[in-house]
Image (cartoon, rainbow, N blue to C red):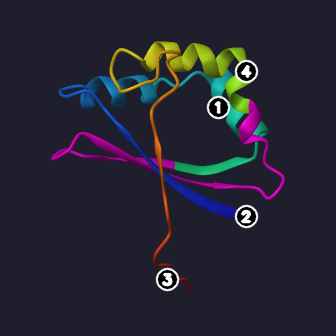
Amino acid sequence: METIAFRMVLNPGMREEYERRHAQIWPELVDALHNAGVRDYRIFFDPGTDHLFAVLSRTTDHTMDQLPQLDVMRKWWDYMADIMQTAPDHTPLSQTLDPVFHLSH
């Protein structure tokens, strides 16, 4: 299992809408993420910057690189494009974060 983290940017004033949409996440998208090896996916919000901080665990044989080719993933990104920073094709703009500390049991 591997853990990765990344940052995205929410448009100002869109926190409640972002939370509402994620509370109603499509079951077929959840299935696609699980099938790609995504586990324990969490997203946090920084109200001072409108940044979203995401951290997830993924299996060593994950297929996350294939998610952008899935219709359900593309539709979700289209659905979210009006409330967050995205590329012209609606892929969320994200910055990979480097691990600098880990405390385990």
Residue at mark 2: 1
| Residue 58 within the segment the image draws in magenta | yes
Q: Nearer the viewer, mark 1 or mark 4?
A: 4
Q: Amino acid at mark 1?
A: Val
Q: Nearer the viewer, mark 2 or mark 1?
A: 2
On screen, residue 83 versus residue 60, left or right, reads left
Instruction: Residue at 58%, 21% (x, y): give it.
Output: 26
- Helix, strand or loop for disc 3: loop
User: Of the residues under marks 1 and 4, which one precedes in the sequence?
Assistant: 1
> Cβ–Cβ below 8 Å for labels 4 and 2?
no
Q: Residues within 10 Å of mark 2 (few under 14, many from 20)?
A: few
Viewer-side residue, 32 vs 74 = 74
Spatial CA distance of label 1 from label 3 is 29 Å
Spatial CA distance of label 4 from label 2 is 23 Å
x then y, percent, for residue 68:
67, 26
The stretch in magenta equals 42-66
Spatial CA distance of label 1 from label 4 is 12 Å
Spatial CA distance of label 3 from label 4 is 35 Å
Q: Amino acid at mark 3?
A: Leu
Q: Which mark is residue 30?
A: 1
User: Of the residues under marks 2 and 3, which one precedes in the sequence?
Assistant: 2
Q: Amino acid at mark 4?
A: Leu
Residue at mark 4: 70
Above or below for 31 versus 94: above
On screen, residue 90 versus residue 32, left or right, reads left
